[in-house]
Image (cartoon, coloured by chain):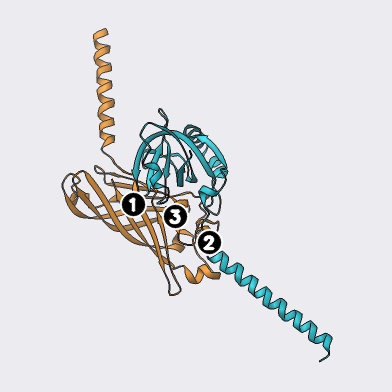
Amino acid sequence: MKKNSILFSGLVVIFIFSTLALQAEKLVSYKTHFKFYSHTSVEDIEANNYAAVGTIDPESGVVVFSVPMQGFEFEKALMQKHFNSGNFLNTKKFPKAKLKAQITNLNEIDFTKDGIYPAMVEGDLTIKGVSQKIKEKGTVTVKGNQVTVDSKFNLTLVDYGISFVKGKPSTNVAKTVEVTVKAEY
Amino acid sequence: MNPKKKKIIKIAAILIVVGLLTGGGVMLYLFNMPHRNVQETSTDYSLSSTELVVEYLKSSDAADEKYLAEDGDSKVLEITGTVKKISEDFKGQKVILLQNKSDEAGVRCAFTTDTNPHVTSVKMGEIHTIKGVIRSGVSFDPDLELYENAILEKCDLIK
């Protein structure tokens, strides 16, 4: 009886460790770069963020990014204040943006073999509490133990409830901004 | 025109010019307003990394309300904790993770190109106090399946 319970606890320990080992395979990135770029005839505006966290599950192909919105830095302080404010991104109420997507061509990507793989992702992007479906392209680069993800896509601000009817932002901020993503896992 | 009327017009003209100059000056100042210098801003709260983590895990809404500002110039904190990790971000800024043993998460402190050299002397496992502006708090993210650290930027070591 005692032998059995020892055997049982042994199995439980093995089970816990094996699940932990499986979870550990998920790739985590704390080194990221998100860039917004807006172009109009009046001016070009750029904002950079280096504080997002991302994960990729090579088994399921699920890609997640969580972006702290107050981490976006603009050249001009006033633009940064506008960006954070209630009528733009309301970052006090919605401190994080989230991307949760699925790599749809996972069978074409080998995370264990060096190479540059084009990736297709489909999922949801949530900004300011508004979720929209996205379907974008990216690149997965595998080199040694290092996995890097790159992507560039366009965002239409009004889709996320961000619009300007009058004033400087309505003429100086593009309706569609370009987002560049880079993450090292 | 009588001299009285002339005088009134003259004063009005001067007032308009002064008004325009002041208005224009204010606009120009606002447009080119420099970023807040976090290190020269007085500290709003001093606490340990554990205290901040516990406060956020208890209620992230209440903590966001307390620490985050609507215009992005959020609270300036001095956080004391154990150095768990030293790394660098894509901007070349040094990043120190302050996290005490047995805490679910920590405080990720990003330095600047100016304060980077101060990190050279920092070693893993040491206890340090770091001052910076909070950008976001601690929370468990079910999609990432991990605890997100609080984010502090524009950091420097406090002697």
Q: Which residue type carries mark 2? A: Leu
Q: Which residue is mark 2?
A: A78
A100 left or right of B76 in image: left
Q: Which residue type carries mark 3? A: Phe
Q: Residue at x 38, y 44 (%)?
A: B95
Name the subunit of mark 1.
B
Q: Which residue is mark 3?
A: A72
Of A21 and B143, the residue lying toward us:
A21
Give a yes or no on whether discs 3 and 1 share a subunit. no
Which mark, by number, is residue B90?
1
Q: Position of residue B131 (x, y in %)?
A: 49, 42
Secondary structure of the residue carrying tag 2 is helix
Please say if A27 is above or below A156.
above
Q: Which quadrant of the view contains residue A39?
A: bottom left
Characterize the local packing of mark 2: few (<14), some (14-19) or many (20 or more) Cα atoms within 10 angstroms.
some
Q: Residue at x 38, y 58 (%)?
A: A35
Of B6 and A161, the residue lying toward us:
B6
Q: Which chain is cyan?
A: B
Please say if A132 is above or below A13.
below
Q: Position of residue B6 (x, y in %)?
A: 79, 87
Name the subunit of mark 3.
A
Secondary structure of the residue carrying tag 1 is loop
Report the quarter where the N terminus of chain B lies: bottom right
Of A150 and B119, the residue lying toward us:
B119
Name the subunit of mark 2.
A
Characterize the local packing of mark 1: few (<14), some (14-19) or many (20 or more) Cα atoms within 10 angstroms.
some
Q: Colour of chain A?
A: orange
Secondary structure of the residue carrying tag 3 is loop
Q: Position of residue B74 (x, y in %)?
A: 54, 48
